[in-house]
Amino acid sequence: MSLAAAPGTGSTSVSPTAASLWRGGRGILLVALIVVTGAVIGVLLGGSGESRLLDPADTSSSGGKGMAQLLRAHGVRVTRVTSVAEARAAGSGGGTILLSDTSSLTDEDAEELARMPADLLVVGVRTRLDLLAPGVSVAGTTRTRSREPRCALPAATRAGSVYMGGMAFTAPSGATTCYPADGKPTLVSYPDAGRTITVVGDGQFMTNLRLAEDGNAALALNLAGARPALIWLVPSESAPAGTGEENLYDLIPDGIKWAVVQLMFVVVLLALWQSRRLGPVVTERLPVVVRAAETVEGRARLYRARRARDRAAAALRAGFVDRTTPRLGLPSTAGPDAKVNAIAERTGQAGAHVGAALYGPPPADEAGLVALAAYLDMLERQVKES
């Protein structure tokens, strides 16, 4: 809309649109077209690419390439395999097998993995756990958060707090249990026929997103890099690993999510293009002019009607301190004693009287309130004149 100045000064339109600043908005429409085109291309090209949880070749936030590179930097030979047969052919003796998904494995595959002469690291797995880690069973689910090890397992104690949770377990006799949640461990490790089986409730601490937090990288390196070779099994037809509970949002392809974000950006641009910016401040006459004295008198009448002598005294004291403190050369943070001493020295009044007037109890009656006001007024005049 157009705002008019005060009478006698004429009127001026102060509401040009943002479109007039950029050739009627053609530039913004061009940007919007580019963004929409990018969104469509993102859906077409990115819809088929799906991240794989704890895949050593995946660079997404849920992938495990960061962990694989960390292991290789520490001299661990990392071999990515997609089947149990490839794991057997890779030579598992003296190494460690890491498994984070059993959705496409058969019972025979799980039994064969359990027979291989290698340490077994099972991460975030719920199905066929009885075949892979006999004696370990799922006791429930728990929230994944930073947890302390609270155990004597060297790999955990050296790492410290880790982003751990997901599933809690019951452990066999002789097992070492760590990172408890509600009394149940989320990490179980125990010896079995000359090798070590370790079961972890959630593998998010190993992902690219979480690896640099807390002691996540240290625990991942200690568990997966305990042997000179790591066979990382990523089944070729696996579904995204997790707890088995997926909502509608998890089923939406990443390309669609990115397209929605870009379309929201386009909507914001269009809103800015169609909006009208604010103009300069325009002065206008007030309908009523109220004298300051009338405001003070009105507030005083309210205090009197409510017998609020304490609030009235507090207002008088606060106003006196605010006005006189700068004249005394004191900072606003000066304490009561400093203010009382400065006023007493400047006015020659007794410090006890000044302190009682500023910080004493509220007046008992209206006569006391009037006397307080008069005394504060006298002090203020003496401060100004000194």
Image (cartoon, rainbow, N blue to C red):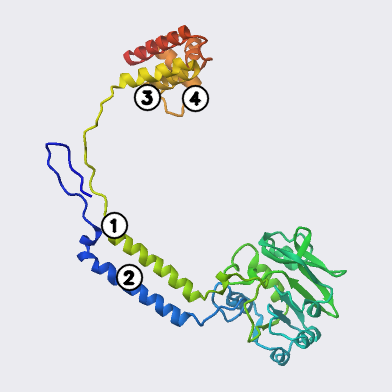
**Residue 141, horizontal then vertical, whole percent:** 72, 65
Determine the CA span between mark 2 and mark 1: 16 Å
Name the amino acid type tagged 1: Ser
The quarter holding residue 174 reads: bottom right
| Tag 4 near tag 2, CB within 8 Å | no
Q: Position of residue 177 (x, y in %)?
A: 79, 65
Q: Which residue is mark 2?
A: 32
Question: Does 169 appear above or below 105?
Answer: above
Marks 3 and 2, how far apart at CA:
57 Å
Mark 3 or 2, closer to the camera: 2
| Three-letter amino acid code of the residue under disc 2 | Ala
Q: Secondary structure at mark 1?
A: loop
The amino acid type, in three-letter code, at marker 4 is Gly
The answer to whether mark 3 and mark 4 are in CB contact below 8 A is no
In the image as oriented, which residue stretches furthest toward the right? 173
Foreground mark, 1 or 3, reads 1
Amino acid at pointer 3: Pro
Q: Quadrant of residue 120?
A: bottom right
Residue that numbered label 1 is attached to: 275
User: Nearer the N terminus, badge 3 or badge 4?
Assistant: 3
**Dot 2, how many residues are within 10 Å of its Cα: few (below 14), some (14-19), or many (20+)?**
many
Number of the front mark, 4 or 1: 1
Query: Which mark, by number, is residue 344?
Result: none
Helix, strand or loop at label 4? It is loop
Name which residue lies at 45% across and 20% down.
339
- State which mark lies toward you, 4 or 2: 2
Q: Which mark is residue 335?
A: 4
Label 3 sits on residue: 326
Residue 256 spot, x, y in % from top left: 47, 74
